[in-house]
Image: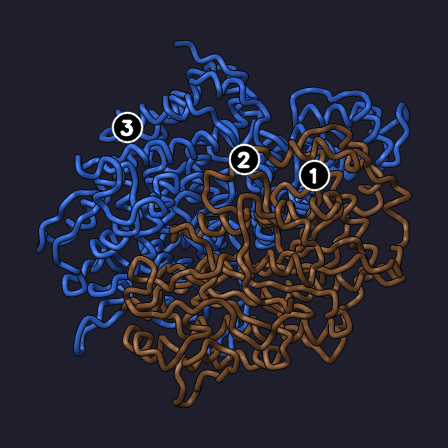
Chain colours: A blue, B brown
Amino acid sequence: MSFDVEPRLLLNKLAFGPSAADLHDVQRSGPEGWLQHQLKPPMQDDCTQRIDAAHLRLKYVSKAPEAQVDEDRPIAVIDQPIEERWRVVEKNEPQQERGFFRTAVAAATLTRAVHSRWQLREVLVDFWHNHFNVNAVGDNLVAVALPTYDRDVIRRHALGNFREMLEAVATSAAMQIYLNNRSSRGGAANENYARELFELHTLGRPAYLNALYNKWRKVPGALEGQPQGYIDQDVYEAARAFTGWTIEDGAGTGPGRRLPLTGKFTYVETWHDNYQKRVLATEFDPYQPPLSDGRRVLDLVAEHPATASYVCDKLCRRLVSDTPEPALVAAVAKVWSENSRKPDQIARTVEAIARSGSFRRSAAAKLKRPLELYASFARATGIVVAPTAGLIGELDGGGQRLFGWGPPTGHPDQSDYWLSSAMVRRRWSLLLGLADDIWKAGAPIAAVAIAEKDTPESAVRAAHRVLLGSEGDGKLVMAIVHGLGLKPGLPFDTRKDALPLARRMLAYCAMTAAFQMR
Amino acid sequence: MLRRRTLLLASSALSLAPSVRALAAPPSSGQASLGPILVTLFLRGGMDALGVLAPVDDRDYVACRPPEMRLLADGDKPALALEGGPAGHDFRLHHEMGALRELYQEKRLAFVHAAGITNGTRSHFGAQELIERGITNPDEASHVAGGWMARWLAACNAAHAPAFAAGAGAPESLSLHADTISSPDLRGGMNLPGGKQAAALLPHLYGGNSAFERAARRTLADVVLIDGRLRQPDGKVAPYQPAGGASYEDTEIGRGLTSVARVVRMETPIRAFAVDMGGWDTHDNQPGRLANLVGQLSRALAAFHADLHDRLGEIVLVAMSEFGRRLRSNKSNGTDHGHGGLMLVSAPSIAGGRIHGEWPGLASDRLDNSVDLAVTTDVRSVLAEVMAGPLGTPAAIGAAFPNFTPKPVGVTRA
């Protein structure tokens, strides 16, 4: 089975766009070698030096508690264990101290998206952060939990086993806070997590059959123990199963007793609803050992065929096109299910997608989301990322607020959503700002060589080649030359403003439909 | 499914890229009014209808929620008494909604209780999709294309007129509409990044027919329509001066309704507006959160009505949420997803100052699936009624809501 995919397509889909180094890698080891390498990244992060060196400006004045801060803070604070970070909660420090952890993870994410060798992992980290969305902007306690969620939950399992990832998510402080399970108590359980576990994390909305059936035994397949989907009764019962799963957040557990303040997962037996349950037509006996009710729910949903279809459909939409062929999704879901007990289940699934005919034919099938637009521009033009709050603010305003999407769906993955007039304007301003380096977050090095071309048209052609690997058609080249107020054929490299003009050439070439798609 | 691009391809009006001259042209003004304006307000997350407007003396209501989770007739913050509710009950409004009660008492505003979708979904995203697409069941989406506002516009011969969404993106109710202008906040203007250089250059980049190129052309035209009208002669964005002594708060709903009012005053061909307000998914710590939300909503609506006091004869505003919340509260001091919800209608010539909709009651055998307020009024019946009445577009109802027969609600005065 030969894997013969055009290198630019490969890097646009399974990486954050082509960089000179990765194009070289693909040419040297071939698409097959590159893919095999990417499917087995080492646990180790390869951007630690860059992240250790990165700082973000933190500046605020707080009245209660009284504090004044104006400093360049290292983003490496995200490496601390969660109980260390939880001190800002324990000491009731100003909310900006909590929010900093969100911007720091965003800064590390931008750095890795551009510079990590393990591009496929970065692409999947972005996928899973959206699949298991939490909102660290809406609730700054989630921000304190976010670095652990990013490192020990999403990154650790991004190419691993889904069932293991599911439990890591369920027991994470970030998800416990975001979907309220930490305050769920036996008697009248909080259904928020249980509902989204079914609807968004596993079986998916197509398997929600509540409008058709209101009794569990009516669901087709239920009496054989294999219900086709779920209804509200399953949500209620699963919510009961997760009662007692919580975090050490200082909540009272009885007269004079409180949980510690560390943010770590814990289980409170007295909050758990111990009686018998029935989830997806499976009976749970009463009084099971600690955590086993919840784990059993996770087993059931992870193994359900609807989960394979739903998650694989989303993966295909992310990696192939907005409308993946049903046959592709079915073939990929088969691989997913067959490998459900393997430690590299997700890697094997992604490999199946990459080897499909649909993948090979999917050039320019999707609009880049703002993160992809940023990273692909930076990678193509040789920006060395020095993340700043200004850059993160621009991406936030452009519609892709990293770790700050409100609803648990994650950012939309349909191109149409990103084409509103507000967002198209922000795409233009993002590219102009990157080219001119107005956020002081790294200038496009490629502009230097472009500024040395002898005529404006050869400079525009060079800019186009940097971004798209080809010279661009003549009409487009001339439109940019004239638009910049230049005359074809006149000397370019001798102009004093050749460098700023070269940067603008990069920006306008990146605004073409060809560069906006992946 | 018919996708957005299919409809866009059919649109010839969009094939014209704006010229440099058009970008520089001053805004036209003094156009004649194009008729009534529709403003829809979507309260996302599922507004707890029973925490906003409820019969405080109902035995089941009192039994199913602790005092902090329900409206109270007495205490230090009693809920506001309302006339015009279903007979035999003491319906009261959340104490933070005093400004809204005034609009109600002036008979400008009416409520429809126990309103929602007839489908049994308790999924946010499922329920929002059904309401915004204007359909009964998800499988209809395969043959009923786009959102109900888009179909309504098309049926009013306004398929190519711009609509305005006060948010980052366009909501599903405007899905497949050819031209939705979106902006979460107009205070910074709606200029073209890159200024004159970009204005001259960009139209030449987008001559093709890909989805991105069409969107880019549309955005260039939107900038021309809106930004010129926002600016003073010196090029700065004019600060917005609301009329009628109104003052908007800097909240999502405050910014959204400010933008709507501002665009209404610009006299553009825009007659459909969609505004979002999120945060209603109160699974925990509901009392404080809900009080904040309803206060913001109430004050923003009061400011909007004061601001556009001289235009209210043409403004129809309908607020809705994907569902109400469970009658019984949970132990997180919150409520989980429910069914029947609450709608709010403000329009000229309506039966205001009344709570419409058949009240189903809260006894166990009256609840949907024994747990949730039942739905007695389909959201579409209310919308159809305002189309027939104050919007003056009775012929568009069938297109907006195919396969649906509206039932009389009585919100509009016959």
In screen coordinates, is B160 left or right of B126?
right
Q: Which residue is mark 3?
A: A337
Q: Is residue A493 left or right of residue A116?
A: right
Parent chain of label 2 = B
The chain under label 3 reads: A
Disc 1 chain ID = B
Residue A355 in the image, given as x and y percentages of width and height: 42, 18
Label whose residue precedes the other's in the sequence (1 or 2): 2
Query: Quadrant of the image for the C terminus of chain A?
Result: top right
Callouts 2 and 3 on one subunit: no
Residue drawn at (38%, 72%) of the image: A92
Q: In whole angstroms, how far apart are the C-alphas of marks 2 and 3?
A: 32 Å
Q: Are marks 1 and 2 on the same chain?
A: yes
Kindly report the distance in space between the C-alpha atoms of the residues bearing marks 1 and 2. 25 Å
* Label 3 crowd (10 A; few <14 / some 14-19 / many >=20): some
**How many neighbours does mark 1 have within 10 angstroms: few (below 14), some (14-19), or many (20 or more)?**
many
Amino acid at circle 1: Ala
SS for tag 1?
helix
Secondary-structure class at tag 3: helix
Q: Please say if A219 is above or below A106.
A: above
Task: Answer yes or no: is residue A398 visible.
Answer: no
Relative to the observer, which residue lies in front, B333 or A425?
B333
Coordinates of residue A96 in the picture (x, y in percent): 48, 65
How crowded pointer 2 is (Cα within 10 Å; few <14, some 14-19, many 20+) is rated as few
- Residues tagged 1 and 2 counted as in contact (Cβ below 8 A): no
Q: Is disc 2 placed on a helix, strand or loop?
A: loop
Residue nearest the viewer, comparing A178 with B273: B273
Mark toward the viewer: 1 or 2: 2
Residue, disc 1: B215
Q: Would you name the residue on which mark 2 appears?
A: B143
* Residue at image coords 29%, 66%: B330
